[in-house]
Amino acid sequence: MSCSKESTKEKLPEEKPNQIVLIFKNPNNNGVYEIPGTDGQTVRNLYAMRGLPIEAIDEQNLVKYYGFNETKEYDTLIIPTKRDMLELKFAYKAIDRLTYYFQNGDTVFIEYKDIKPYATILNRNEAFEVTNYQLLRRDSLLKVDFPALDKYAKYSFTLNEWSRETKRTGDRIDLKEFQKKFKAQQVEKILTEYTKDKLHLDSLEGQGLISVPHKTAIFNDFYWLLKNEIQLEVSKTPENSQKLIQLLKKLEEEHPNINIRSDSLLASINYQKHIRGIASKEFKPEWMEIKSDQAGSRITNYISMYDSVRNSNLFSASEKLILQYAYVDQILQNPSFFNIEERLIYLTRFKNDFNDTTLFNTLVKKYNVKFEIDDEVLLTDKMGVEKALRTVISESQGKVVYVDFWASWCAPCIKEMPSSQSLQKTLADQNIEFIYLSTDRKEKPWSEAIAKHQLNTGLHYRITNADNSKTMEELAVQFIPRYMIFDKNGKLVNNDAPRPSEQEKLIQEFNRYLGQQ
């Protein structure tokens, strides 16, 4: 027998950090991108513009958006995860997305050079070209601004190319014929780009630079993105779709398990889009539409979709959870389309269907849901003092009251603010009160918008019970910005008044009530 100083105890596996740390230098949200050769035409990404340019799937298989402070030179983001590998999609050039794959415990330094995010993993050795595969694929491998599948999928590319070609030739070009030709060209490029991708990824694997799970994830992402587009296009352009279907079959032959649906794939953003596409194709949801003199909007009937998926056998329990959660989220998010009773019924139904108190509470917190119906519209001012709208209007009795419904995230609302402030100066000697009611659910974005845009005039309040107020529902504020006028006696006399930028028209409206006794 021999002796050893080493412990004979079996080593326990290292505990995972269950997080990924991203350290940003000169971060850029990529929310707006000016398309080259279009005389300044821009495209926008609303999530990125709101400071949420990073998309991922969280522990409960729900899509979640993350962000950073792009006004800082450095910023840090910690993303909790128990997954071995996490897929992150970064907004890029507004309408493109760069996919990165990081491992549990990774600390990643991401330096933005202009709009391009270059990532370096600090805690382990991974080839720079593997970490930044999607970015370098565009810049070096394919040498394109946007991949062909993006151009095939997004109609904006067809319009931009059509507009550019029309200007270049001076000819009238039929848009439908141009689209057909343009899409056919992109199909050929998709096939060529796939061949280049495969050869390059095989080479990286042969050199031992990329792991099998990482390479598999890249192919899976492309496969489900391609399948989603075919699902949308097969009835429109069958000749293009056939070539892409053949590419799908080729992928399925090269990766035998790639097309097998399983709950493990719910960690993929493009796979989740495929599941949503199946639901939409199967149940063909009807549209709900509302219109006013100045605006119009329509959305899917999410109540119908919720009930259809709930009663369907097409989906696993996990798939039903993410679909029905998304539908309830939309129901709660759109009080203009779904009344208070419907919102409370479907939130409660979701809780009973899945017994998931965590997700239920997430929705309750997100939308400040109260399981009671208020008669009043309740407000809070900048000091946190609460009042009812009826009280605020009565306190201005003897004045004509101009009410502005707005929100920090509403670009048209913000655009009207300089005109509104200018109008207040013009009418400073008139008996008019300007009241601003924000529909922001959270105090922080509201107060930050007031400071950022120097909204120092008028009375400012935030509505705290917009989703469960009967009076708010009766006011039917379906779109913002929205303006209303109350007369000197506190009576609502115009529930869709002119905007501040329509100054002449608005002053005429004010004059109708200023002489009132």
Image (spheres, helix red, strand yellow):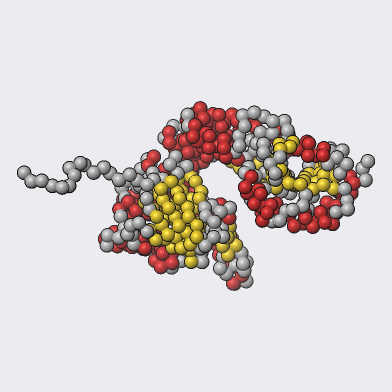
Extreme-bottom residue of the structure:
169
Residue at image location 87% in from the left, 38% down from the top: 489
Residue at image location 83% in from the left, 41% down from the top: 396
* The C terminus sits in image quarter: top right
Marker count (numbered): 0
Up the image or down, 90 lies above or below 433; here it is below
Q: Is residue 129 left or right of residue 185?
A: left
Instruction: Quadrant for residue 328, please give it.
Output: top right
Q: Is residue 425 left or right of residue 206?
A: right
Q: Residue 6 in the image: x percent, y percent?
A: 17, 47
Towards the viewer: 51 or 88: 51
Q: Is residue 227 visible?
A: no
Towards the viewer: 386 or 216: 386
Instruction: Quadrant for residue 135, please give it.
Output: bottom left
Q: Residue 359 in the image: x percent, y percent?
A: 50, 36
Q: Residue 264 in the image: x percent, y percent?
A: 37, 42
Towards the viewer: 371 or 144: 371
Residue at image location 54% in from the left, 60% down from the top: 72
Q: Is residue 32 visible?
A: yes
Q: Residue 349 in the image: x percent, y percent?
A: 54, 29
Residue at image location 78% in from the left, 42% down from the top: 495
Q: Is residue 102 left or right of residue 11?
A: right
* The N terminus sits in image quarter: top left
Q: Is residue 260 left or right of residue 34?
A: left
